[in-house]
């Protein structure tokens, strides 16, 4: 069998391969602490589960409109309009199975071979994977540790060219937990004013997981609403990773094109899951608030613990649920350290280079785990590093 040439350009998400390795070790009887997977360890709130069950029992077991059922699209438009301060309606919304299809469909609809796409580095690996897949060129803007993993705006400005078709933003960020503040977002929007054909894919999947200040979307900046695709969803905010429910909010003409891609790819999203999504947005939000509060405490715990280990330093993330410690002073490569932590210490983490070349010298740790497990992991990491220094 001969695969299409484009398959050689398609990347992966290392978190799932490390998870598989960790599960294999567990099957052998090993005790593994999971800090590799970006998944809340909380259950989906009970009211959302009940809404999904009621929908199944009520006959929501058939096809739905490709862009999503109207009540959910209305609820999403209402939520986005209220939280971002922008004028959008259900005609701007496309509901998809998880967040990734919005990355996939947006790039497929807007980008072709020879184009350039500006994106942060390190960043979620599927951005680069999809740009490579369509034959375009990713152009990286390094995230700077000293800036709280914010953009270097001079590098961003220098990266814009006549070939730029799309800019990808992600705030709060995976893998760094960094946040683009309003002044940075406004500066990016001002720079883009001179490049009217450039669209923006703003990945805001962690927008509710913010520990400092308010979330700001570039779609709220003057002139940017008609040039922005907002990616958001339910997986992180409502601990609904297995439900596979996400959405994009975008100009109506693009929404029609993305819907056409969805028709060709997935037809539609599970009907009962969409009904659960309505309850998630319009029901009580106390579970979300409690989850974010718990993540805040875990963040402080893991960052303090990492900074207490000689040779490791870690910036305090302002959002999401990831720590991105700098391990370069240890004198050992990030992949070697990640492998050793899994195989020898029983702690599953990801090398920073799983998120791009500018992740060299870093690890990514998800603190979507209990305080007890975080403390155990920190003890194991400190012991493993100590053994390396004595070797």
Image (tube, rainbow, N blue to C red):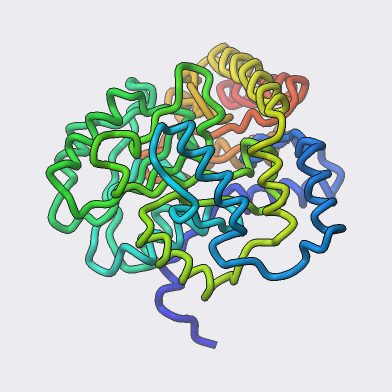
Residue at point 47% right, 70% down? 261
- Viewer can see residue 219: yes
Q: As rendered, which of 244 and 249 lies closer to the eye?
A: 249
Residue 151, position as x, y percentages in the image: 30, 31
Residue at point 33% right, 46% down? 119
Up/down of 376 relative to 138, above or below: above
Left or right: where does residue 226 sit relative to residue 240? left
Q: Quadrant of residue 266?
A: bottom right
Up/down of 189 relative to 135, above or below: above
Q: As rendered, which of 366 and 262 lies closer to the eye?
A: 262
Instruction: Please state, as top left, top right, bottom left or bottom right, where the N terminus lies in the image.
Output: bottom right
Residue 239, position as x, y percentages in the image: 69, 39
Instruction: Please state, as top left, top right, bottom left or bottom right, where the C terminus lies in the image.
Output: top right
Up/down of 338 relative to 292, above or below: below
Residue 369, position as x, y percentages in the image: 71, 29
Q: As rendered, which of 109 and 16 lies closer to the eye?
A: 109
Residue 370, position as x, y percentages in the image: 75, 25
Q: Residue lying farthest bottom?
A: 1
Residue at point 41% right, 39% down? 170
Residue at point 64% right, 48% down? 18
Q: As rendered, which of 117 and 22 lies closer to the eye?
A: 117
């Amino acid at each position: 069998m001969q695969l299409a040439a484009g398959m050689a350009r398609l990347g992966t998400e290392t978190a799932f391969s490390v998870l598989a390795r960790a599960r294999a070790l567990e099957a052998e009887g090993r005790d593994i602490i999971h800090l590799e997977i970006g998944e809340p360890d909380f259950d989906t709130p009970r009211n959302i589960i009940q809404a999904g069950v009621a929908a199944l029992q009520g006959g929501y077991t058939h096809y739905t409109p490709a862009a999503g059922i109207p009540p959910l699209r209305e609820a999403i438009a209402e939520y986005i309009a209220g939280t971002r301060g922008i004028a959008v309606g259900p005609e701007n919304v496309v509901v998809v199975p998880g967040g990734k299809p919005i990355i996939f469909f947006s790039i497929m609809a807007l980008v072709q071979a020879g184009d350039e796409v500006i994106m942060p580095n390190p960043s979620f690996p599927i951005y680069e994977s999809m740009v490579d897949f369509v034959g375009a060129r990713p152009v990286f803007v390094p995230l700077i540790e000293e800036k709280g993993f914010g953009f270097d705006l001079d590098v961003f400005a220098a990266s814009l060219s006549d070939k730029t078709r799309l800019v990808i933003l992600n705030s709060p960020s995976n893998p760094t937990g960094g946040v683009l503040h309003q002044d940075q977002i406004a500066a990016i929007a001002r720079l883009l004013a001179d490049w009217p054909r450039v669209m923006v894919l703003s990945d805001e999947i962690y927008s509710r997981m913010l520990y400092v200040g308010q979330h700001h979307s570039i779609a709220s900046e003057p002139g940017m609403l008609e040039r922005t695709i907002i990616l958001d969803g339910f997986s992180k905010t409502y601990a609904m990773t297995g439900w596979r429910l996400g959405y994009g909010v975008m100009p109506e003409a693009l929404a029609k094109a993305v819907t056409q891609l969805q028709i060709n790819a997935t037809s539609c999203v599970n009907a009962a899951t969409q009904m659960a999504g309505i309850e998630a947005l319009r029901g009580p939000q106390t579970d979300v608030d409690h989850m974010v509060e718990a993540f805040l405490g875990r963040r402080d715990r893991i960052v303090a613990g990492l900074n207490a280990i000689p040779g490791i330093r870690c910036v305090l993330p302002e959002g999401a649920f990831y720590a991105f410690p700098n391990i370069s002073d240890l004198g050992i490569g990030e992949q070697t350290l990640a492998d050793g932590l899994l195989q020898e210490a029983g702690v599953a983490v990801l090398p920073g280079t799983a998120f791009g070349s500018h992740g060299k010298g870093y690890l990514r740790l998800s603190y979507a785990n209990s305080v007890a497990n975080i403390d155990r992991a920190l003890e194991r990491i400190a012991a493993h590093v100590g053994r390396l220094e004595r070797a």
